[in-house]
C-alpha cells in the first residue's frame, strides 16, 4: 500500500472561497508557497446556483485584487459605480453621491458577479501554480498540530502542515470550531433575495438603494453581458416569511413585483437569473486567532449587506495578513508566532467592530416604519446632503479608504 503523502508548505489556507483564493493569490504572487484546500470543486463553485450574488468591489479592494494579479482579467466583467442614490422608501428625499464631486473622480466601486470573480480567481491560482497549490475537493479528517507546525489530515490520508494556517472557511468555520473560539450572533430575521435583472433603459452607472420597512432594496449597475441587455443586480430584503413567499412566486408574478419595486426609471424589467435567498445575520468571532492559526473573512465576521461591505472588509484582512507574513518571512521570523497573530488581530478588530456597528445601526434605523424614527432619518439624510464634508467622509468609507491602509491598498508592492 502506498504511504500517505505529507505536503509541507509555508501557509495552509482552509477554504478556497472568494477570500481564501484571494489570499492564496496575493501570497503566491509575492513568492510565498501556499496550499489552499476546499471541500467543493471549482466546477460546482462556478455553477449558476452555487452563488447568485454580485459584489460591489470597493476602490480599496480592487487594489487587493490587483496585488493578487487578477484585476486586469476582471475588468471586462466589472461595471463601475459612478453615482449612488439613497432614498428613504418612496419619499422624494434622497442622498446623492457623485464620484466626480465626492469620490475624487475615481469610481466608488465596481459590480461583478461572484460566479465570474470565482472563475477568474481559479484561473489565476492555476497561473500561480509555482507557488500556489489548490486542492478541491478535499475533505478534512482531522486538524493536527505540534510545536512548530499546524495542519490537517485529509480523508484520503494526505497530511498537510505549515507554520501558519489560515481559516477562510466561512460562517460555519470548522477551523474556528477546532480552536474553540466562540461567536456573537444576531439573527436579523430578514432574507436578501438576489437576482440579475434586464431593463429597457440604461442604468447610467447609478447604484440605487431604497430603504423600505422590511429592509433595503438595492439596484446595482451591471455590465451588459453576453446578450447585450441593460442589466442590474438586485438585493431585495424582506422579512423571513415574506421572502419565502416572494421566492415561490411564478416567474411572471415575480417580474410584476420587481416592476413595482423598481418603478419606472429603468423602463420595463424582468429577471434573467434564478432568484436566490440569503438569510441575514451578524456574526463576530471573539478572537481572530489561535495557536499558529489566523481567521479571516466570514470565518471571523459576517455583517449585514446593507452597505455592500462584507467582502470588502475581508479584503482588508487579506491585505494586512499578507503584509505581516511577507515582512516576517523577509526577516526570517516564525510566521506562526504569537507576535504576528497579535498584530493581525489588533490591526483588524476595530475596523470590523466599526463596520458591524454601522451596518447594524443602519439596518435598525432604516428598516422600520416608526414615525419618530422616520423623522430622524429625514433630518439625517437632509443634513448629509447639505454638508459636502460629511458626504466626502461617507464616500471615503464606501471606497474603503478610511484609516491606515496596508501597503497593497496604497498601491505599493508587498
Ligand atoms: C445578499 C448579499 C450581498 C452581498 N453583497 C456584498 C457586496 O456587495 N460587497 C461585499 O463586499 N460583500 C458583500 N456580501 C458579503 C460577501 O458575499 C461575503 O462576505 C463573501 O461571499 C464571503 O466569502 P468568504 O470567502 O469569506 O466565505 P465563503 O464564500 O463562505 O467561503 C468559504 C469557503 O470555505 C469552504 N469550506 C467551508 N468549510 C470547509 C471545510 N470544512 N473544509 C474545506 N473547505 C471548507 C467552502 O466550500 C467555501 O468555498 C454580500 C452578502 C450577501 C448575503
Image (cartoon, grey):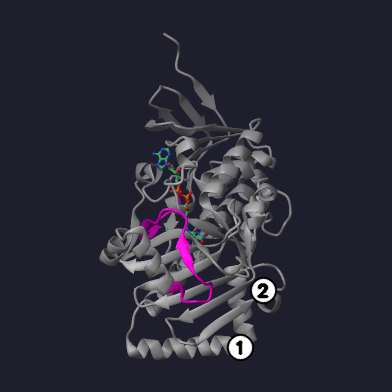
Q: Is 336 above or below relative to 133?
A: below
Q: Residue 80 placed where, x, y %?
A: 64, 63
Instruction: Measure how far apart labels 1 and 2 are at the Cα level.
Output: 16 Å
Q: Secondary structure at mark 1?
A: loop
Q: Nearer the viewer, residue 57 or 281?
A: 57
Q: Which mark is residue 99?
A: 2
28 shown above or below 18: above
Q: Residue at x 53, y 72 (%)?
A: 266
Q: Nearer the viewer, mark 1 or mark 2?
A: 2
Which numbered disc flags the more N-terminal residue, 1 or 2? 2
Q: Which residues are magenta?
A: 261-289
Counting other residues with Cα less than 10 Å from the Cα at mark 2, is it few (<14), some (14-19), or many (20 or more)? some
Crowdedness of circle 1 by 10 Å Cα count: few (<14), some, many (20+)? few
| Magenta stretch: includes residue 208 | no
Q: Is residue 331 visible?
A: no
- Please provide percent x and percent y for residue 288: 45, 52
Extreme residue toward the top, this view: 1
Q: Residue at x 52, y 51 (%)?
A: 114
- The residue singled out by tag 1 in the image is 387
Q: Does residue 165 appear in this view?
A: yes
Quarter of the image with the N terminus in it: top left
Q: Residue at the spot x=60%, y=65% of the render?
A: 400
Dots 1 and 2: beta carbons under 8 Å?
no
Residue 384, picture quadrant: bottom right
Q: Is ligand 1 less than 8 Å from the beta carbon at label 1?
A: no
Amino acid at each position: 500500500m502506498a504511504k500517505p503523502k505529507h505536503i509541507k508548505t509555508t501557509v495552509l489556507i482552509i477554504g478556497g472561497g472568494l477570500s481564501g483564493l484571494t489570499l492564496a493569490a496575493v501570497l503566491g504572487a509575492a513568492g510565498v508557497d501556499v496550499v489552499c484546500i476546499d471541500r467543493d470543486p471549482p466546477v460546482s463553485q462556478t455553477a449558476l446556483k452555487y452563488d447568485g450574488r454580485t459584489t460591489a468591489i470597493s476602490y480599496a479592494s480592487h487594489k487587493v485584487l490587483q496585488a493578487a494579479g487578477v484585476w486586469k482579467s476582471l475588468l471586462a466583467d466589472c461595471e463601475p459605480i459612478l453615482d449612488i442614490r439613497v432614498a428613504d422608501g418612496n419619499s422624494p428625499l434622497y442622498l446623492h453621491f457623485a464620484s466626480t464631486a465626492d469620490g475624487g473622480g475615481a469610481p466608488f466601486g465596481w459590480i461583478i458577479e461572484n460566479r465570474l470573480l470565482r472563475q477568474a480567481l481559479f484561473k489565476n491560482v492555476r497561473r500561480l501554480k509555482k507557488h500556489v497549490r489548490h486542492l478541491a475537493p478535499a475533505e478534512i479528517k482531522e486538524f493536527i498540530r505540534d510545536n512548530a507546525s499546524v495542519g490537517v489530515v485529509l480523508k484520503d490520508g494526505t497530511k498537510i502542515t505549515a507554520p501558519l494556517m489560515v481559516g477562510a472557511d466561512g460562517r460555519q468555520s470548522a477551523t474556528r470550531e477546532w480552536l474553540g473560539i466562540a461567536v456573537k450572533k444576531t439573527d436579523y430575521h430578514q432574507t436578501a433575495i438576489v437576482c440579475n435583472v434586464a431593463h429597457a433603459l440604461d442604468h447610467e452607472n447609478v447604484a440605487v438603494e431604497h430603504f423600505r420597512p422590511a429592509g433595503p432594496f438595492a439596484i446595482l449597475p451591471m455590465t451588459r453581458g453576453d446578450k447585450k441587455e441593460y442589466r442590474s443586480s438586485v438585493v431585495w430584503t424582506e422579512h423571513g416569511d415574506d421572502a419565502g413567499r416572494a421566492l415561490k412566486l411564478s416567474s411572471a408574478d415575480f417580474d410584476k413585483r420587481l416592476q413595482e419595486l423598481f418603478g419606472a426609471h429603468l423602463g420595463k424589467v424582468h429577471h434573467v437569473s434564478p432568484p436566490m435567498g440569503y438569510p441575514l445575520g451578524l456574526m463576530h468571532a471573539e478572537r481572530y486567532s489561535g495557536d499558529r492559526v489566523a481567521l479571516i473573512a466570514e470565518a471571523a465576521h459576517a455583517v449585514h449587506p446593507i452597505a455592500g461591505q462584507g467582502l470588502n472588509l475581508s479584503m482588508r484582512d487579506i491585505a494586512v495578513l499578507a503584509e505581516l507574513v511577507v515582512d516576517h518571512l523577509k526577516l526570517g521570523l516564525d510566521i506562526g508566532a504569537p507576535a504576528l497573530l497579535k498584530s493581525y488581530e489588533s490591526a483588524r478588530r476595530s475596523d470590523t467592530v466599526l463596520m458591524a456597528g454601522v451596518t447594524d445601526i443602519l439596518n435598525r434605523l432604516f428598516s422600520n416604519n416608526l414615525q419618530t424614527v422616520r423623522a430622524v432619518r429625514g433630518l439625517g439624510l437632509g443634513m448629509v446632503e447639505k454638508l459636502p464634508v460629511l458626504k466626502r467622509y461617507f464616500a471615503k468609507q464606501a471606497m474603503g479608504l478610511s484609516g491606515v491602509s496596508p501597503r497593497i491598498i496604497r498601491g505599493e508592492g508587498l
